[in-house]
Image (tube, rainbow, N blue to C red):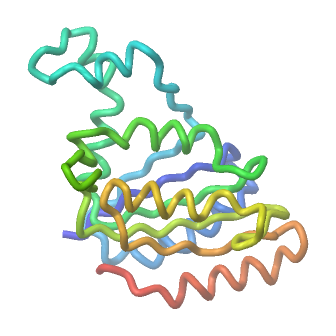
Amino acid sequence: MNNVLRIDASMRSSNSHSRQLLDYLTSKLDSHASKIEYRDLSEHLPLIDEAWIEANFTEPSERSAEQRATLALSDSLVVELKQANIILIASPIYNFQIPAAFKAWIDLVARAKETFKYTENGPVGLLENKQAIIIITSGGTKLGSDIDFVSNYLRHVFAFIGIEDLTIIDGSGIGRDEQSIIEKAQQEIDALSLLV
């Protein structure tokens, strides 16, 4: 079973370089995937708040109906992630970081006892045997530069929940040379070794 989860983090539904590159990547998997689940973060996710934190840290068997409702969206996002073998994400860089909606998604899926656990030797990710491919685009922020606060953060947070097979496709610097950056990113996609 090759279940694919596609996540679009751009807040633009059209004229989005990250979405266009993710379309290109997704087309490579169309004939191999048993299922492709789509999650568009431009439809907005709630930020975690005190009620969510209280519900999350209450033992599942002790949660009230209201607490279960508070966690319902987070639960469904975690299930999507658990069921996927391959996770495809496209994210622009906004003001030197990932979009707020992408961070909200991370906050909703990075949950103790669900996607990671604490042990005597530190935290251990629970989402194993998955492949993640993240396309990062930007107008001017170059990946690997002193102002790249995105790529290492994403590598860390995905490894934290157990996804260590992670590839970043570099679509950064489009504002300087759009055509060549897009072509280079497509070449990186063409060279991918996919779990299909």
In this orientation, which residue lies closer to the viewer: 19 or 140?
140
Which quadrant would residue 69 be assigned to in this image?
A: top left
For image coordinates 59% across by 85% down, the residue present is 188
User: Which residue is at the far left?
Assistant: 61
- Residue drawn at the location 55% of the way across and 82% of the way down: 189
**In front here: 73 or 33?**
73
Total number of numbered labels? 0
Q: Relative to 63, does residue 184 appear above or below in the rendering?
A: below
Residue 107 in percent (x, y) is at: 45, 37
Q: Which of 41/102 is in front?
A: 102
Across and down, in percent, residue 170 comes to 65, 74
Does residue 113 appear left or right of residue 148 in this picture? left
Q: Position of residue 35 (x, y in %)?
A: 29, 61
Indicate the quadrant containing the C terminus: top left, top right, bottom left or bottom right: bottom left
Left or right: 4 as drawn, with respect to 141: left
Q: Quadrant of the N terminus?
A: bottom left
> Residue at the location (19% across, 50% down)?
120
In this rendering, the answer to whether 155 lies above or below 56 is below
x%, y% of residue 156? 47, 60
Residue under the point 76% across and 71% down = 145
Residue extending furthest right? 176
Viewer-proximal residue, 20 or 187? Answer: 187
Horizontally, is 132 left or right of 170 in the view?
left
